[in-house]
Amino acid sequence: MDKPSEIFARDFEWAELSRFAAYEAPQATLGVVSGRLRQGKTFLLDALTTATGGFMFTGTETTEADALRQFGDALAAHVGEPHPFRFATWDEAITRLLRIATAGPTVAVIDEFPFLAKASPALPSIIQRALDPAAQRGNTPVRLLLCGSALSFMGRILSGNAPLRGRAGLELVVPTLDFRLAARFWDIADPRTAALTNAVVGGTPAYRREFTQGDTPADAGDFDSWIVRAVLNPGRPLFREGRYLLAEEPELHDTALYHSVLAAIADGNHNRGGIASYLGRKSTDLAHPLTILQDVGMITHERDAFRGNRSTYQIAEPLLAFYHAVMRSAWGELERPGRAPDVWRRLQPTFRSKVVGPHFERICREWTRWYCRPETIDGFPSTVTAGTVPDATDRTAHEVDVAAFGHDEAGRERLLAIGECKWNDMMGPGHLRRLDRIRDLLRAREGVDAERTRLLLFSGTGFSDDLRTLARRDPAVQLVDLDRLYAGA
């Protein structure tokens, strides 16, 4: 099927959904679609059912009896029955659903499936039984898609000993738009404006469509005004979104604790010890909340590139980082209309250091992993992360913002490149000397192949003439500005 013109990007997702919908086998088949909130999963599935004449039902937080009543009403309307179906159990409902494909493969979507399963815990087992070979004799070629945003729940549907393990012919995760796609989606041509906007709202499609009604920064000069009118405005949906995101996750019961953990990370505490110190708790007390936040996609947990016993936590959703670093401390003031301009002027340094700086580093790692040419770093990166390199001579430790690992011709791991990222600083020869020193330290370490390691310098401001001259003389030195991040390789 041709992808509808109103769907931006999502070519891979549409192709997989189309393939699943058109599968010609005579039996019913199962697919699972998941992804973080506001990524456009329902938009995709609604377009699919519209294009194929399929059935779509969206679950709500309600009782089992009420859910069955709603489902019976919707299914009867879809098949043209003059009276609603009245199902006593989900066994009856699922059995009837899997018999609606009377004229060939038919898509049936159950959206917000976790709500239904919460009220009816046996529902996954009921679906599993309905897809068993013995039950398939009465089924028709329904292409059943279960969809949900509760990542921890959706991740368990097909894992381990779950009833639906091994039953799905599609397991599709709809991701957040990356920084380049987000710039196109927001229709922002200026890379500096695009990077600043991405540091606030990330690549979540709903934040442009539903939450701002298309209000985008016209250029870098309009960015501050846009923040005040669209994000810090108590009359706009984005204002409270940072609070609501956690409240909408069913796995997060003690939201105050989880907000505190996120605030600690946003304040620059990226390891468990630092987070525990910020909260005044023991490090062991944080194992569960950190795991849950990771399971629901709110934070990431990454191993240090050069110190295997260390790891860091980062906030995965930019709007949450912005809320905790900028908005949370001034919430009472921001709730008063007209105060946003003064608050924003006061907190811009915090925004640059604790939001834009870390986010720019993430964009640089993303570019290194997915967009730079093999010639740029002399290889294909398999892992790109950050790390720390101890320096015994200077009794210090050097932070490495970008560390790209790949493999040589014999399959051995080697360090392709290391990089430093500066959003607001003009980079010069001193930054290059620092990276060169770190490379020397790594070359002296056992177990790290850094002989051909290249040096990447990323800047949101620019590079001095002296540094540009040095880079022209040495292909192992690569300068990456905003234009190259957004359009080059």
Image (cartoon, rainbow, N blue to C red):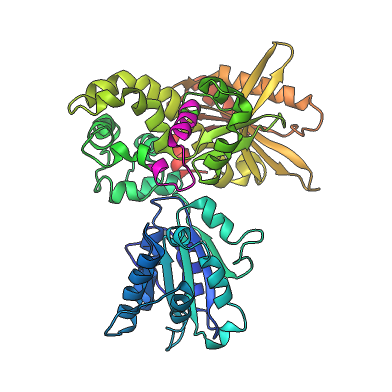
The residue at the point 62 percent across, 19 percent down is 434
User: 97 left or right of 197?
Assistant: right
Camera-nearest residue between 283 and 404:
283
Q: In this view, does 149 lie above or below 239?
A: below
Residue 481 visible within the image: no
Viewer-closest of 247 and 200: 247
Secondary structure mostly seen in the magenta stretch? helix
Q: Is residue 60 left or right of residue 432?
A: left
Residue 258 included in the magenta stretch of the image: yes
Image quadrant in which the N terminus is located: bottom left
Can residue 218 be seen in this snapshot?
Answer: yes
Q: Could you tell me which residue is drawn at 60 percent across and 62 percent down? A: 158
Which portion, as a residue range, is magenta? 245-264
Location of residue 133 by image quarter: bottom right
Residue 80, picture quadrant: bottom left
Q: Tag count in the figure?
A: 0
Position in image of residue 288 (x %, y %): 58, 37
Residue at the top extreme, as displayed: 394
Does 441 appear in magenta? no
Residue 317 location (% of width, % of height): 45, 40
- Spot occupied by residue 86 in the image (x, y as percentages of width and height): 35, 78
> In the image, is 189 to the left or to the right of 10?
left
- x, y (%) of residue 421? 52, 28
Work out whether 56 lies above or below 324: below
| Residue drawn at x 52%, y 54% as measured from the top left | 153
